[in-house]
Image: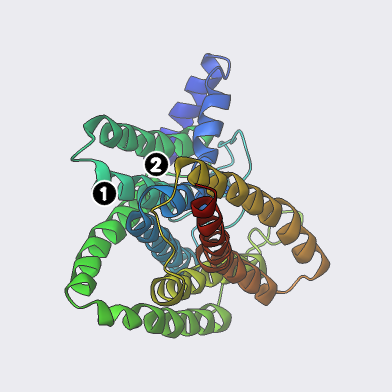
C-alpha cells in the first residue's frame, strides 16, 4: 500500500505538470541543512533562552534517536524497493524514519509546546508546517508514509518527554549535571554500536553497493557529535556563560545577523572543505560537535562580553 500511495502521488504530479514540485522541495528544505539549527538559534539568542535551549535539546535528541533507528533497521529507499518510483530529487542512505520529519516535528513541536496556547495562530502554523513537511517527503518520492509518520511521532514524543524532563530539572536545578553525563555515556554507546554492528551489503545490477554502510555511519557520527555538543553546550552555558536577554532590540538583531553569517560560513565553507580534505567518520563527529559548541557557548560568550563592555561606555556618554 505504501508504494501504491507514492505511485498515486507520482501520477498526480505528472498529470499537473509538476506545478507544485518546487513548492514542496522548498517546504522540505526548510527543515533540513542549514535550517536545522537556525530557528533554535534565533529563539536562543534573542527571544527566550530557555525555549531556545529546549529546542536545541529536542532536535539533538530526536535526530540522535533517528540515526539509531536508521542504522538499526536499514530500510531501503522507495525507488530501491520498486523501480516504478521516480523521485523528483535524490536522497542517500536509509529511508526509515524520515530525518526531515523528525527535525520538523522537534522544531515546530517545540514552538507549538512553548507558544501554542498563548499564540494560537502561531501554533496552527506550526501544525500546518509539520504536515506539509511530512507530505512533501511523500510527494517528492523519497519516503513512504510510515517513514514520515514514525519520524514525526518520534520528534513529538521527544518534545513531550522533554517537557517532563525540564520540569523535573526545574524542581532541583542542580540536577542539570545529569544531561551532559547522559550525553557522554549515550554517545559512547551509540558510536560503539554503529561501529560494530553488521549492515546489509546488497549490490545493484551494475555491481555497486545499493547503500554504503560506511557513508551511513558517517551520518550517524555527525548526529552523535551534534547530540554531545548540545548536551555539553547547554550545561556549560547554563553554569558558566549565562548570557543575558536584557539587551536592546538592535543588539538582538546584531546577534542574529552575525550569528547567521557564522552558521553560513561554518556549514557552507568550513565543513565541506574539511570533509573533502579528510574522509574519516570522526571528522564529521568533531565538526558537528564544534558547531554546536560554537552556537551555544563560544558565540554567546563573545557577544555577551562585547555587550557588557559597551554598557559602561553608553552609561558614561549619557
Q: Nearer the viewer, residue 59 or 215?
A: 59
Residue at the image position 56 percent from the left and 45 percent from the top = 254
> Whole-percent x and y of residue 300?
52, 62
> Whole-percent x and y of residue 115?
26, 43
In terms of image quadrants, where is residue 180? bottom left
Query: Label 2's element?
Result: helix
Image vertical order of residue 229 relative to residue 107, above or below: below
Disc number placed over residue 224 in the picture, else none:
none
Residue at the image position 58 percent from the left and 36 percent from the top = 87
Q: Residues within 10 Å of mark 2 (few under 14, many from 20)?
A: some
Q: Is residue 149 visible?
A: yes
Q: Which residue is mark 1?
A: 114
Q: Which residue is mark 2?
A: 2
Q: Is residue 4 visible?
A: no
Image vertical order of residue 292 relative to residue 6, above or below: below
Image vertical order of residue 211 relative to residue 11, above or below: below
Direction top: furthest residue: 16
Give the spatial CA distance, label 2 vs label 1.
34 Å
Residue 288 lies left or right of residue 107; in this view the side is: right
Which image quarter is the N terminus in?
top left
Q: Residues within 10 Å of mark 1 (few under 14, many from 20)?
A: some
Direction right: furthest residue: 277
Q: Which of label 2 and label 1 is nearer to you?
A: 1
> Whole-percent x and y of residue 47?
38, 47
Q: Nearer the viewer, residue 291 or 159?
A: 291
Image vertical order of residue 287 relative to residue 105, above or below: below
Residue 109 lies left or right of residue 299; in this view the side is: left
Residue at the image position 42 percent from the left and 81 percent from the top = 186
Residue 114 lies left or right of residue 177; in this view the side is: left
Q: Nearer the viewer, residue 127 or 118?
A: 118
Query: Label 1's element?
Result: helix
Residue at the image position 67 percent from the left and 73 percent from the top = 281
Amino acid at each position: 500500500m505504501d508504494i501504491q500511495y507514492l505511485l498515486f502521488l507520482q501520477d498526480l504530479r505528472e498529470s499537473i505538470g509538476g506545478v507544485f514540485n518546487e513548492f514542496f522541495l522548498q517546504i522540505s528544505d526548510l527543515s533540513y541543512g542549514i535550517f536545522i539549527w537556525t530557528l533554535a538559534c534565533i529563539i536562543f539568542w534573542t527571544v527566550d533562552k530557555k525555549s531556545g535551549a529546549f529546542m536545541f535539546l529536542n532536535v539533538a535528541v530526536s535526530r540522535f534517536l533517528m540515526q539509531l533507528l536508521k542504522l538499526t533497521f536499514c530500510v531501503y529507499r522507495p525507488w530501491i524497493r520498486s523501480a516504478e518510483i521516480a523521485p523528483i530529487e535524490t536522497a542517500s542512505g536509509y529511508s526509515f524514519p524520515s530525518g526531515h520529519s523528525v527535525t520538523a516535528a522537534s522544531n515546530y513541536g517545540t514552538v507549538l509546546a512553548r507558544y501554542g496556547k498563548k499564540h494560537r495562530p502561531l501554533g496552527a502554523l506550526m501544525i500546518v508546517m509539520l504536515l506539509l513537511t511530512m507530505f512533501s517527503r511523500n510527494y517528492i518520492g523519497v519516503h513512504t508514509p510510515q517513514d514520515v509518520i514514525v519520524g514525526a511521532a518520534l520528534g513529538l514524543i521527544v518534545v513531550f518527554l522533554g517537557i517532563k524532563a525540564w520540569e523535573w530539572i526545574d524542581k532541583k536545578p542542580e540536577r542539570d549535571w545529569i544531561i551532559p553525563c547522559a550525553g557522554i555515556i549515550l554517545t559512547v554507546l551509540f558510536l560503539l554500536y554503529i561501529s560494530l554492528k553488521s549492515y546489509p551489503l546488497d549490490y545493484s545490477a551494475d555491481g555497486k553497493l545499493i547503500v554504503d554502510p560506511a557513508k551511513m555511519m558517517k551520518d550517524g557520527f555527525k548526529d552523535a557529535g551534534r547530540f554531545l555538543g548540545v548536551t555539553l553546550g547547554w550545561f556549560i552555558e547554563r553554569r558558566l556563560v549565562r548570557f543575558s536577554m536584557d539587551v536592546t532590540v538592535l543588539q538582538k538583531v546584531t546577534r542574529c545577523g552575525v550569528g547567521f553569517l557564522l552558521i553560513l560560513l561554518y556549514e557552507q565553507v568550513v565543513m565541506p572543505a574539511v570533509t573533502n580534505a579528510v574522509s574519516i567518520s570522526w571528522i564529521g563527529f568533531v565538526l558537528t560537535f564544534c558547531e554546536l559548541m560554537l552556537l551555544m557557548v563560544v558565540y554567546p560568550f563573545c557577544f555577551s562580553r562585547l555587550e557588557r563592555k559597551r554598557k559602561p561606555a553608553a552609561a558614561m556618554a549619557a
